[in-house]
Image (cartoon, rainbow, N blue to C red):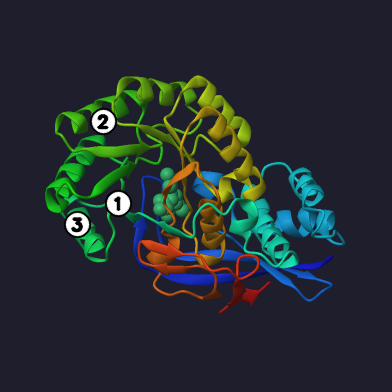
Amino acid sequence: MKIIDIKLGHISVPLRTPFKTALRTVNSVEDIIVRIETDTGNVGYGEIPPTGVITGDTTGAIIGAIESHIKKALIGMDIENIEEIMDKLDKSIVGNTSAKAGVDIAIYDLYGQLYNAPVYKILGGYRKEIITDITISVNEPEEMARDSIDAINRGYRTLKIKVGNDAKKDIERMKAIREAVGYDVDLRIDANQGWNYKEAIYTLRKMEDAGLNIELVEQPVPGHDFEGLKMVTDNVSIPVMADESVFSPKDAIKIMEMRAADYINIKLMKTGGIHNALKICNIAEVYGVECMIGCMLEAKVSVNAAVHLAAAKKIITKIDLDGPVLCSEDPVDGGSVFNESKIILNDAPGFGIKDIQGIKYI
Ligand SMILES: C[C@H](N)C(=O)N[C@H](CCC(=O)O)C(=O)O
Ligand SMILES: [Mg+2]
């Protein structure tokens, strides 16, 4: 099964409500679709969100990386040589993890088709069903409390609350939400790098003192500030998760060696796809550090690939794969079934994506 072409397209999917974090506000998913064609007629799909504020990857840069570098490196290669393909993909251009992830996902889709097996079974096949949290955007405390109740009415039992744009108000936000939802619901928070380490320690201790029972805090300080992250981890009881601090397997080793965080959030767009995400899973197993699998604002093609990884790996114990349920429609035929918090895998070969509506080829 040889790669004969890599085509790129664009999809646009409106969100149910604006998605707001300490870093950005977004109204729709505007992603690049990767379609890899082979000499056997098999097609593999990938998807790439341009999340410039986190990965540095813009739409133009993603297209340029694939058209001018990745395509040249991979055309003609045989899918059965996946190790060599991933080596060439890594070396085709520095950085550009999102472009690499979209191509990596399409390659794994084809790899599963080649061996007529779903990818999650090839990678480990640990479970067939996973439960995701849902994100509550950062807004005024009362609005966030209302959004949290709505999420619970939709069946979610774990909420990921966005904070980080105003430390004092963040405490009010969490008080309003906890008061509204009670104590049967798990609340995790994500500051998206919005605090410095002193603000983080102050704010998180206030939340502890108020008995808010926070499950974990994601990326309280800037991604590059490993020492600050460790200061927070050492000085609060709420467990700390590294997100923007960990892109590569090397980052993961550094964070784990330093004991700078309690958990790692793996996202395919940061790692450059499944092949590097698997390395982080292996490192995490060695260090005994549980992982979350997360996503950017993505539709079902790439999130479905993350679902397969989550289903394959025991070390992934926390799921934040809510991209598709934040969207107002699903352009994807096939793949896992997203029934609000419950995500059920199917056993179609590869990632099981049959078709994607509304692709505008570039
Ligand atoms: C969508 C997901 N639940 C999430 O919150 N991901 C963010 C980054 C998303 C983005 O800005 O596209 C995160 O975990 O930081
Ligand atoms: Mg995060």
Name the residue rendered at 46%, 37% in the picture.
290
**Amino acid type shown at disc 3:** Glu
**Amino acid type shown at disc 1:** Thr
- Residue 58 is situated, as x and y percent measured from the top left of the image, at 59, 54
Q: Is residue 279 above or below residue 61?
A: above
- Does residue 260 appear left or right of residue 170 in this picture? right
Q: Is residue 25 visible?
A: yes
Ligand 1 within 8 angstroms of badge 3 C-beta: no
Q: Which residue is mark 3?
A: 143
Q: Which residue is mark 2?
A: 204
- Residue 296 is situated, as x and y percent measured from the top left of the image, at 48, 54
Q: Which residue is mark 1?
A: 158
Q: Is residue 262 above or below residue 340?
A: above
Query: Rounded to the nearest whole Å, what is the CA distance between mark 2 and mark 3?
Result: 22 Å
**Amino acid type shown at disc 2:** Leu
Q: Nearer the viewer, mark 1 or mark 2?
A: 1
Q: Quadrant of residue 342?
A: bottom left
Query: Rounded to the nearest whole Å, what is the CA distance between mark 1 and mark 3?
Result: 18 Å
Closer to the chain start, of discs 2 and 3, is 3
- Residue 120 is situated, as x and y percent measured from the top left of the image, at 59, 57
**Crowd class of label 1 (few under 14; some 14 to 19; many from 20; radius 10 Å):** many
- Residue 249 is situated, as x and y percent measured from the top left of the image, at 62, 35
- Does residue 70 appear left or right of residue 125 in this picture? right
